[in-house]
Image (cartoon, rainbow, N blue to C red):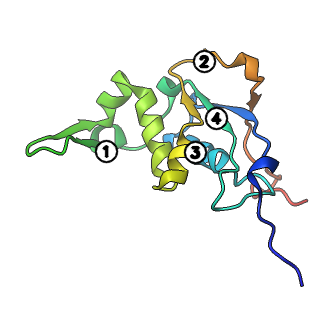
Amino acid sequence: MQTTYMAKPHEIERRWYIIDAAGRPLGRVATEAARLLKGKHKAIYTPHIDTGDHVIVLNAARVVLTGKKPEQKIHYRYSGYPGGLKMTDYATLMAKNPERAVYLAVKGMLPHNRLGRVMLKKLRVYRDDQHPHEAQKPLLWEGPEVNKEGGPALE
């Protein structure tokens, strides 16, 4: 009988990856970051264990929102008090705090439980192309290998 492999916490090897967000749509950058944070790019992926890597997102100020999203997409914050709902359109959010826009997009794609909160701690977002993590020797993430037809590469 064959059993399903489950990763053990001591078997997980964590790497650091850099994603350059300059000129790329916000959702595309966020899905790649969430995939790396969850560890879905690894063969040892186990849903109930954090097998993911550390992710550094650079150039958050140069990320692109397509269509009419800068004017129509709204970010809501609620303090919990009556009348405490604050609304900000993404044009203002991207101008004032583009790191928060990327952070929120990735947060929405991770599990909404304690495992997701642990994964989110491995995300670092920076406005420009400078970061203080050179000692970790981060690798530039180019995305999954793509064949000539545009689909995923076949091994």
Q: Is residue 2 above or below residue 101?
A: below
In which quadrant of the rendered image does the C terminus lie?
bottom right
Q: Which mark is residue 140?
A: none
Q: Earlier in the sequence, mark 3 or mark 1?
A: 1
Q: Earlier in the sequence, mark 2 or mark 3?
A: 3
Asked if the residues shown at circle 4 and circle 1 are in contact, with their CB atoms under 8 angstroms apart, the answer is: no
**Label 2 crowd (10 A; few <14 / some 14-19 / many >=20):** few
Residue plotted at (50% across, 44% down): 106
Q: Earlier in the sequence, mark 1 or mark 2?
A: 1
Which callout, 4 or 1, points to the residue nearer the camera? 4
Of all residues shown, which one is farthest toward the left? Answer: 82
| CA distance separating discs 1 and 2 | 26 Å
Q: Image quadrant of residue 72?
A: top left
Mark 4 residue element: strand
> Which amino acid is tagged 3?
Met
> Which amino acid is tagged 4?
Val
**Label 4 crowd (10 A; few <14 / some 14-19 / many >=20):** many
Q: Image quadrant of residue 95?
A: top left
In the displayed structure image, the side of residue 10 where residue 154 appears, left or right: right
**What is the x, y in percent for residue 123?**
57, 35
**Which residue was labeled with disc 3?**
119
Asked if the residues shown at circle 3 and circle 1 are in contact, with their CB atoms under 8 angstroms apart, the answer is: no
Residue plotted at (47% across, 55% down): 113
Q: Is residue 130 above or below residue 27?
A: above
Q: Which mark is residue 55?
A: 4
Q: In this rendered view, identify the residue nearer to me: 19 or 77.
A: 77
Residue 65, can we see it?
no
Q: Is residue 136 above or below residue 107?
A: above
In the displayed structure image, the side of residue 93 where residue 100 appears, left or right: right
**Which residue was labeled with disc 2?**
129
Q: Which mark is residue 73?
A: 1
Q: Earlier in the sequence, mark 4 or mark 3?
A: 4
